[in-house]
């Protein structure tokens, strides 16, 4: 369990001191459980301090953090180069190395995400409901921070900035636990944000509002997630193995999605040119993400026309196709010398998240069969129908039980930034609580405020 985080235990300090230690300051050894307890205790204390900040103060700190990231490109890429070297030594796939890399564009996007979070309305304190009872007791339901949120993730160091900014805006203290392959990038991103926040707010900035777990010891996760007196919520982001392992060991609530097996269904009434562009985007724009398409479903009536055309375009991107018997027969008959692999799909392929240039292909008999396939093999993440028939689209969107269901659009839009949330804390496929991209509102709980003048219950 937690193989990605395995490493010999090494004692490190907690809180803001971990950054000093990372850059050479000597600190006394502490046990891992004590270290995690102190980390969580400091976060709980900072959560109370965060609740005192005004919206203007939070926004000023976030803007300063964005400026710090934007102006630190060379330093960030230098730290990230060390992580990429570690990733290659761990034999990470090309897709995973892509997730790990911090390009100029991604650093710019990180900073822009923080600015967008600062520009969004503050959800804390929003009145959700208000009522007066017959006895005159007034009740008001208001949004509040959750408290201490633990984020566990792999690769993608931009998650450090996204998660920390959203938690900070909503008054939540955050504890970040990235993979060992991204430790240098994660530590630096957090340090830059903390220093910028302190410069913007001085002593008003809670010293432990943003913390990175400083050890790659795999036992840190169950130790941290056993601290129900301090930690309020855990959100794992990464592969199915990581998420299942976190869910199984955690004693605190976990918001999760196990995997992204996303589908594109090309209906008989589809504009086939549009369908081709959507398939290419959903599969190839960034195949390493959880909202990339893994299966293409094609209505039988258009399969003979559409499949050879889209296969040729996918071949240009070196996409391997894993086909059911009918689509395999169509493609083998139409393409004499395929430029990329076209092979028969195994049963396990239909429920596999590849995060790579591999796409399942199946011919189905209409929208009902497409819905049945998605119900059997999908992961309740993101699915789309391409059709000009509004009634068919409405049926698909009503009956496909996924967090995001599209009509004539790529599955790649299931993302907090694309949904106008600024950054995102993650994507949930749970049905209780948050679902889909999680932004500011999804990081809030609520409480009831009662206003009386001596009412007593009889």
Image (spheres, grey):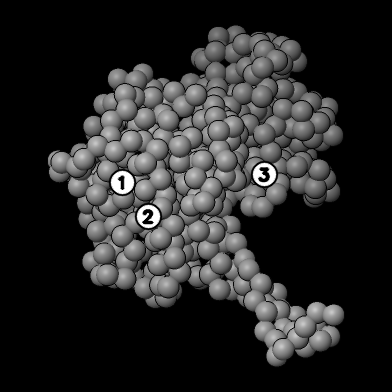
Query: How far across and how far down the image is residue 2, in percent?
Result: 46, 27
Residue for point 70% across, 49% down: 432
Q: Quadrant of residue 260?
A: top right
Number of residues whose C-alpha sits closer than 10 Å to that of mark 1, classed few (under 14), some (14–19) or many (20 or more): many
The first of marks 3 and 2 along the sequence is: 2
Separation of residues labelled 3 and 2 (CA atoms)? 29 Å
Separation of residues labelled 1 and 3 (CA atoms)? 32 Å
In the depicted structure, whether residue 423 falls above or below residue 206: above
The first of marks 1 and 2 along the sequence is: 1
Residue 310 shows in the view? no
Tell me the tag on residue 306: none
The first of marks 1 and 3 along the sequence is: 1
Query: Along the horizontal axis of the image, is 177 left or right of 269?
Result: left
| In-front residue for pair 361/331 | 361
Q: Which residue is mark 3?
A: 430
Q: Which residue is mark 1?
A: 14
Query: How far across and how far down the image is residue 212, in percent?
Result: 35, 45
Tell me the tag on residue 42: 2
**Mark 1 in CB contact with mark 2 (< 8 angstroms):** yes
Quarter of the rendering occupied by the C terminus = bottom right
Number of residues whose C-alpha sits closer than 10 Å to that of mark 2, classed few (under 14), some (14–19) or many (20 or more): many
Q: Quadrant of residue 283?
A: top right
Name the front one of labels 3 and 2. Answer: 2
């Amino acid at each position: 369990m937690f193989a990605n985080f395995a490493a010999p235990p090494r004692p490190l300090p907690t809180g803001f001191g971990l950054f000093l230690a990372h850059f050479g300051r000597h600190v006394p050894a502490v046990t891992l459980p004590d270290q995690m307890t102190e980390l969580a205790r400091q976060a709980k204390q900072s959560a109370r301090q965060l609740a005192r900040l005004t919206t203007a103060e939070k926004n000023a700190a976030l803007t300063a953090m964005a400026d710090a990231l934007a102006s630190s490109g060379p330093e960030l890429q230098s730290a990230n180069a060390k992580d990429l070297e570690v990733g290659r030594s761990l034999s990470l796939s090309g897709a995973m190395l892509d997730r790990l890399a911090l390009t100029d564009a991604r650093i710019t996007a990180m900073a822009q995400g923080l600015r967008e979070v600062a520009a969004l309305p503050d959800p804390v304190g929003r009145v959700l409901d208000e009522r007066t009872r017959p006895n005159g007791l007034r009740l008001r339901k208001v949004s509040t921070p959750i408290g201490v949120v633990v984020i566990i993730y792999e690769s993608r160091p931009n998650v450090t900035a996204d998660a920390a900014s959203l938690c900070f805006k909503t008054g939540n203290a955050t504890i970040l636990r990235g993979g060992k392959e991204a430790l240098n990038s994660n530590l630096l991103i957090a340090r830059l944000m903390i220093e910028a926040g302190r410069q913007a707010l001085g002593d008003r900035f809670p010293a432990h509002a943003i913390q990175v777990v400083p050890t790659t010891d795999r036992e840190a996760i169950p130790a941290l997630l056993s601290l129900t007196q301090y930690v309020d919520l855990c959100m794992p982001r990464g592969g199915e193995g990581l998420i299942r392992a976190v869910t199984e060991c955690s004693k605190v609530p976990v918001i999760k999605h196990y995997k992204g097996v996303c589908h594109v269904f090309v209906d008989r009434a589809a504009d086939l040119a549009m369908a081709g562009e959507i398939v290419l985007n959903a599969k190839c724009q960034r195949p390493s993400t959880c909202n990339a398409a893994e299966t293409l479903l094609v209505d039988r009536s258009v399969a003979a026309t559409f499949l050879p055309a889209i296969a040729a375009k996918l071949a240009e991107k070196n996409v391997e196709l894993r086909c059911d018997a009918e689509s395999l027969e169509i493609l083998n008959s139409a393409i004499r010398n395929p430029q990329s692999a076209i092979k028969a799909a195994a049963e396990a392929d239909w429920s596999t998240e590849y995060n790579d240039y591999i796409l399942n292909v199946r011919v189905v008999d209409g929208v009902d069969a497409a819905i049945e396939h998605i119900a059997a093999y999908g992961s309740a993440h993101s699915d789309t129908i391409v059709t000009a028939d509004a009634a068919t689209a409405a049926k698909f969107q009503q009956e496909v039980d996924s967090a995001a269901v599209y009509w004539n659009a790529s599955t790649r839009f299931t993302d907090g930034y694309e949904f106008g949330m600024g950054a995102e804390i993650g994507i949930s496929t749970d049905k209780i609580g948050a679902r889909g991209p999680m932004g500011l509102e999804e990081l809030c709980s609520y409480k009831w405020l009662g206003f009386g003048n001596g009412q007593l219950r009889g």
